[in-house]
Image (cartoon, rainbow, N blue to C red):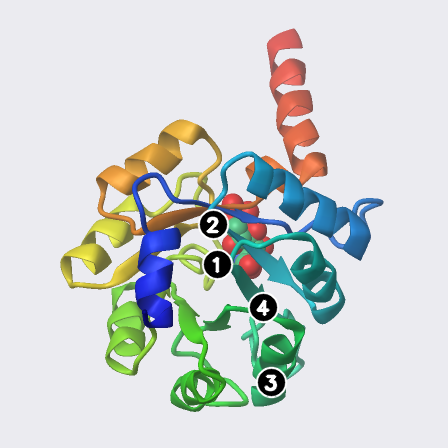
Amino acid sequence: MSLIAKMDAQIGRQGGLVVSCQPVPDSPLDKPDIVAAMALAAQQAGAVAVRIEGINNLRAVRQAVTLPIIGIIKRDLTDSPVRITPYAEDVDALAQAGADIIAIDGTDRIRPVAVRDLLARIHHHGLIAMADCSCEQDGLYCQQTGAELIGTTLSGYTSEHTPAEPDLALVTTLSQAGCRVMAEGRYNSPELAAQAKRHGAWAVTVGSAITRLEYICQWYCDALQEAAT
Ligand SMILES: CC(=O)N[C@H](C=O)[C@@H](O)[C@H](O)[C@H](O)COP(=O)(O)O
């Protein structure tokens, strides 16, 4: 069975929840053994894959879980707004650390390495390529260029204003265009994740609402403060 057929069976099956285990940077939880524990807990609770940032975290998670791992490296570049897996060397390092799927920024922005070259590098390692996109145009380009998975990950993050709600319309548009759509970004409740499925998502990735304890506490603190005024 090809790797993508395996992923269709393992991840894209009905109800596929992918848990992004990316603690808030410099949080007390931002440690490889804690990230690995989060990933194992997600596996035990029924997640079908995990999304992991950074080589040390990926190595620790690879030891702990049998689930498919979506690997990324985030960098803050001075000359490009692209943050997610910008370099070919990042792809090589993620492949070596045990990623099954590698996600890259799939947006049409100034970048050190072309999307086409990063996708080719992922395929050179025999792995599945996911493109984190911001709009229909990005998604269709990345699909035509060979990305097996198209994420809505960067919708709302390429301009000043980030909406509170996820981009369900983009899920619909891309799935109707024949993409395997990973709904990702602000699916902060089970109901929103279920809506992504109803809009045609192949699977849904949830991060903050499951693994960023500080954000979740803040949501509750804000709600309680508002109720008190
Ligand atoms: C925009 C960006 O850099 N997104 C990142 C991609 O890896 C992560 O910070 C998100 O947590 C992830 O996409 C999951 O989304 P949410 O945390 O909203 O469930």
Whether disc 2's CB lies below 8 Å from ligand 1 is answered no
Residue nearest the observer in this picture, 26 or 109: 26
Q: Secondary structure at mark 3?
A: helix
Q: Secondary structure at mark 4?
A: strand
Extreme-front residue of the structure: 1
Identify the mark at residue 92; answer none if there is no mark: 3
Instruction: Quote the CA–CA distance across marks 4 and 2.
Output: 22 Å
Residue nearest the observer in this picture, 188 or 91: 91
Residue type for callout 4: Ile
Verify CB contact (< 8 Å) between mark 2 and mark 1. Answer: yes
How many other residues sit within 10 Å of disc 2, few (<14), some (14-19) or many (≥20)?
Answer: few
Residue type for callout 3: Asp
Label 2 sits on residue? 162
Label 4 sits on residue? 72
Question: Left of 34 or right of it: where is 111?
Answer: left
Instruction: Look at 85% across and 45% down and name the residue there.
Output: 28
Question: Left of 23 or right of it: where is 110?
Answer: left
Residue 88 in percent (x, y) is at 56, 88
Is 162 situated above or below 191? below
Which of pointers 2 and 3 lies earlier in the amino acid sequence? 3
Verify CB contact (< 8 Å) between mark 1 and mark 4. Answer: no
Residue 130 in percent (x, y) is at 41, 69
Residue nearest the observer in this picture, 85 or 186: 85
Which of pointers 3 and 4 lies earlier in the amino acid sequence? 4
> Looking at the rendering, in which quadrant would you find the C terminus?
top right
Label 1 sits on residue? 157
Is 189 situated above or below 160? above
Instruction: Quote the CA–CA distance across marks 3 and 4.
Output: 11 Å
Instruction: Quote the CA–CA distance across marks 1 and 4.
Output: 17 Å
Instruction: Quote the CA–CA distance across marks 2 and 3.
Output: 32 Å
Residue 190 in percent (x, y) is at 43, 29
